[in-house]
Image (cartoon, grey):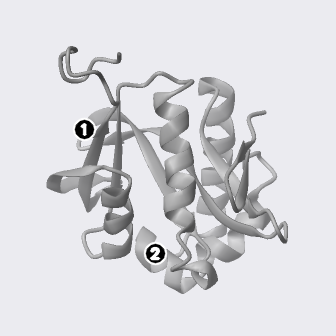
Amino acid sequence: MTVLVTARLEGTPITSDAGPLLSGMLTDPRVARTLGGVPSSDALAGMVARQAAHWTTHGFGYWLWRDRATGTVVARGGLQHVIVGGRAEVEVGWVVDADRWGEGLASELGAAAVAVAFGPLDLHELVSFTLPANMTSRRVMEKLGFAREDAHVEHAGVDHVLYRLRAPSTTADPPGELA
């Protein structure tokens, strides 16, 4: 089990029993509005099962993020394989408890996930995407160094805005190659 620790957060891999810990955050109408709607209990259970299985299959995935000072679950996020715009990608994604919006938690956990992707996982590039109206997440993507690639890409049957980030490399290397 891979634990990630940042200045304010501790992330542990999502496991099959994480549903009750995520339910309040993911069914909050403020959060659900940024994700395309409130998930049903079956949809939430399926999502948690898939995210737990992702860890088993790939050795990485989404973390359950707790406030280090209080132990309270404040976010879900990390890395996962997705199909977006008909293409297989690795996504950096996040969801933060609405009561903690504006504190920089998405940027903090997103930066930790990017460091894992380009460090130990040795990935060449990442994507992140959101609903077009979610300007807050778009600003987080830009803060993390992602550049908008496509203003209209389909994911899960819904229009999204796609951002991409390539791994850093030396100037002597061709674009997209790791140093």
Q: CA distance from mark 2 to mark 1?
A: 22 Å
For label 2, count other residues whose C-alpha is less than 10 Å away and answer few (under 14), some (14-19) or many (20+).
some
Place of residue 91 in the rendered image (x, y in percent of width and height, measured from the top left): 42, 43
> In the figure, 76 relative to 134: above or below?
above
> In the figure, 163 relative to 19: above or below?
above
> In the figure, 132 relative to 86: above or below?
below
Can you identify the residue that label 2 sits on?
37
Look at the image and tell me whether residue 49 can be seen: yes
Can you identify the residue that label 1 sits on?
86
- Circles 2, 1 touching at the beta carbon (< 8 Å): no
The residue nearer to you, when weighing 163 against 104, is 104
Quadrant location, the N terminus: top right
For label 1, count other residues whose C-alpha is less than 10 Å away and answer few (under 14), some (14-19) or many (20+).
few
Place of residue 24 in the rendered image (x, y in percent of width and height, measured from the top left): 70, 76
The residue nearer to you, when weighing 146 against 154, is 146
Is residue 98 shown left or right of residue 154? Answer: right
